Amino acid sequence: MVGGERILDRLVRVMTAALDEPPLLVANLPEAPDWRPDLRVVPDIRRGLGSLGGIYTAVVEAPAPVVCVAWDMPFVPEGLLRRLAGGLLEHDACLPQSGGRRGVEPLCAAYGPACREAIARSLDQGDLRAIAFHERIRVGILPLSEVGRFGEPELLFFNVNTADDLALTDGLWQRLESSPSSGGKTPGRPR
């Protein structure tokens, strides 16, 4: 729970509003269909291949093009998702620039149909980096200055991977709420 709402429920709401259809949930746990019975839930097509395997599954299983968001990112806003999807008009993939180790955030990005074969080749070669296939496609990068219009990138792409991360979310939620790009209100907070 972050901001009074399950992270998954918030992402479903935000993604549905941004993209006009409910998302596909890629999850390998047997109980995953019970998390949101209203969603189509699929396991990784090629199991044990990490994030790139999940992106591949989304590209294969969802109607192309797709916008992927890791379901442990509680602060991703609708506007950013719309902007990433719009980037597919000119590119095979559109990723936001970030301050992370890869320089982009592949777990909050848009992927077009050309990514399917490119990702499959990387998986076949054993290169499981989430950006391994980029050299085979046309990649658009949303500059950090534009990402910043939607909020602070380190907050937007924050992952809740541990109990300590979850404990940090209340303070981060308040920080996001007071950021200039939020207009003084929490983006997408249930009313």
Image: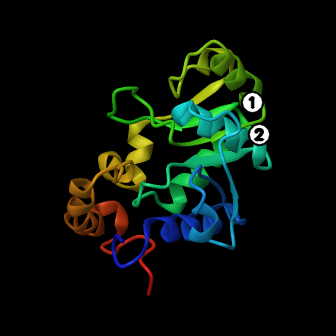
Amino acid at the residue labelled 2: Val
Q: Give the residue at the far front of this rendering.
A: 30
Image coordinates of residue 3 in percent, x first then y, are 33, 74
Residue 141 visible here: no
Quarter where residue 30 is shown? bottom right
Q: Earlier in the sequence, mark 2 or mark 1?
A: 2
Dots 2, 1 in contact, CB < 8 A? yes
In this figure, what is the number of numbered marks?
2
Q: Nearer the viewer, residue 111 or 184?
A: 111
Left/right placement of residue 138 relative to residue 167 reads right
Image coordinates of residue 117 in percent, x first then y, are 76, 24
Q: Nearer the viewer, residue 10 or 38?
A: 38
Q: Is residue 95 above or below residue 148?
A: above
Amino acid at the residue labelled 1: Arg
Residue underneath mark 2: 60
Q: Residue at x 61, y 55 (%)?
A: 82
Image coordinates of residue 34 in percent, x first then y, are 60, 70
Near mark 2 (Cα within 10 A), the count class, few <14, some 14-19 or many ≥20, is some
Residue underneath mark 1: 116
Q: Give the residue at the far bottom of this rendering.
A: 191
Quarter where residue 134 is shown? top right
